[in-house]
Amino acid sequence: MMKAPEVRALSTKEVEERIREEEEQLSELKFRHAIAQLENPLLLREKRRFLARLRTILKEQLG
């Protein structure tokens, strides 16, 4: 996971691409969690929070 200053250094397109990648990964994690127990269920929370961080930084860059 990248820290906020590292994400802010990315371009808008890179942040958008990273959001798409993280959404896909989160979707896959949710699916695997529904089928069987995850080794580390805290990954779901970390992914959600990182996705929120990315979206917030994207809004900062656009706004």
Image (spheres, rainbow, N blue to C red):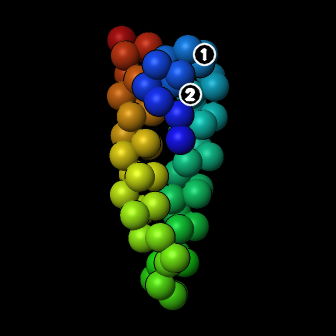
Tell me the number on the disc at residue 15: 2
Mark 2 is surrounded, within 10 Å at the Cα level, by few (under 14), some (14 to 19) or many (20 or more) other residues, namely some
Residue under the point 57% across and 31% down: 16
- Give left or right: position of 7 versus 44: right
Label 1 with label 2: CB-CB less than 8 Å: yes
Q: Secondary structure at mark 1?
A: loop
- Quarter of image, res 11: top right
Q: Secondary structure at mark 2?
A: helix
Above/below status of 48 relative to 54: below
Mark 1 is surrounded, within 10 Å at the Cα level, by few (under 14), some (14 to 19) or many (20 or more) other residues, namely few
Residue under the point 43% across and 42% down: 50
Q: Position of residue 13 (x, y in %)?
A: 62, 22
Residue sitting farthest toward the bottom: 36
Above/below status of 16 relative to 36: above
Mark 1 vs mark 2, CA separation in Å? 6 Å
- Give left or right: position of 21 versus 57: right
Above/below status of 63 relative to 29: above
